Each structure stands twice: as C-alpha cells, then as structure tokens.
Image (cartoon, rainbow, N blue to C red):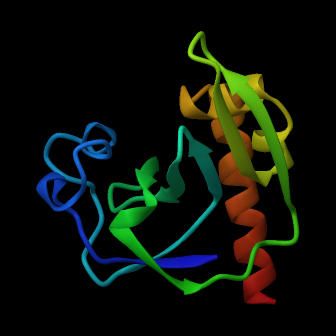
C-alpha cells in the first residue's frame, strides 16, 4: 500500500485528530510517496505506520495522505481487541508480528527494540524482493 502526503499542518486537520500529529507537524514531505507498513483504527481514527522523512517508524493520521496504490501486502493479517479502560476497539491490519496481539501492537507503538528489529527486517526483506 502506497500513500502520498497531502497535508502536514495540525491546523489543516479536525480538532479530534490534531493531538495525534507532532507539535511541529508531521515529518513528511508534501507530494512524497510512502509505503504503509501497518494500518490501525482506534475510536474511529485511522492511523498509518510509515517510515517518515527522519527515518523513524511513525504513526500518523491517514487524513494527511491520499492513497496512490491500495494493494494490501500479502503478509498482512487483521486483528481487533478492546483497548484500555474506555473499552475502545482497536483494529490492526499489518504484518503478523504487529497484528498478532494487543501486546505485539503496543510493543511496536512503544518502539520495543525487538519489535523495531522485526520491523526493519521486514522492510529489508521487501526491498530484496523488489530488487529481484
């Protein structure tokens, strides 16, 4: 799945979304395309995980982007679980090492070293496939 950045300023987004964008704006370049590595929906808000312009695995609201190629990677799985005391439903679409459980998803959000290592190994493997 490939997306293109179309917005980057907090003030361009609805109030509910603004807290999910870094204070100085997302580290994406307008018009640049990014591979999506996971999609998560929490409380009706869809976030995408990309590697931002700083080389960081970032979670950003999908409304900052438009879809260029909506093909879902073949290794993605879907899972959902109830999250936190507010009983929000969290739906995760992504590689199994992220989507397999709430703990796995939280470990990726919190940038647990083991999860981040799996993240970069997957990206490296995808790059090798594309080069073949």
Position of residue 90 in the picture relative to residue 86 (left or right): right
| Residue 56 seen by the camera | no
Q: Where residue 54 sits in the image (x, y, percent)?
A: 33, 55
Q: Residue at x 25, y 44 (%)?
A: 18
Number of on-image labels: 0
Residue 87: x and y in percent read 64, 19
Residue 23's quadrant in the figure?
A: top left
Asked if residue 76 is positioned above or below residue 70 in the image, the reply reads above
Is residue 29 found left or right of 42 in the rendered image? Answer: left
Tell me where residue 72 sits by quadrant: bottom right
Residue at screen point 59% across, 10% down: 85
The residue sitting at 27% across, 57% down in the picture is 27
The spot of residue 11 in percent (x, y) is 12, 55
Q: Is residue 86 above or below residue 98?
A: above
- Seen in the picture, residue 76 relative to 2 is either above or below; the reply is above
Answer with left or right where residue 41 lies relative to residue 91: left
Quick one: 97 or 72, which is closer to the camera?
72
Q: Quadrant of the C terminus?
A: bottom right
Pick the residue in front: 96 or 65: 65
Residue 131: image quadrant is bottom right
Please tell me which residue is depicted at 54% across the width and 54% down the height of the picture: 49
Q: Is residue 7 visible?
A: yes
Q: Quadrant of the N terminus?
A: bottom right
Residue nearest the viewer, comparing 61 with 16: 16
Reply above or below: 69 against 26.
below
């Amino acid at each position: 799945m490939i997306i293109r950045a179309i917005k980057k300023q907090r003030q361009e987004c609805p109030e509910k979304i603004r807290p999910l964008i870094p204070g100085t704006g997302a580290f994406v370049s307008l018009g640049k395309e990014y591979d999506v590595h996971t999609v998560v929906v929490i409380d009706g808000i869809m976030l995408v995980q990309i590697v931002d312009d700083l080389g960081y695995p970032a979670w950003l609201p999908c409304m900052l982007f438009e879809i260029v190629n909506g093909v879902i990677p073949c290794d993605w799985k879907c899972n959902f679980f109830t999250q936190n005391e507010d009983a929000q439903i969290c739906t995760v679409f992504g590689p199994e090492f992220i989507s397999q459980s709430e703990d796995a998803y939280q470990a990726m959000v919190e940038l647990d070293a083991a999860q981040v290592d799996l993240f970069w190994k997957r990206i490296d493997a995808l790059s090798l496939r594309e080069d073949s």
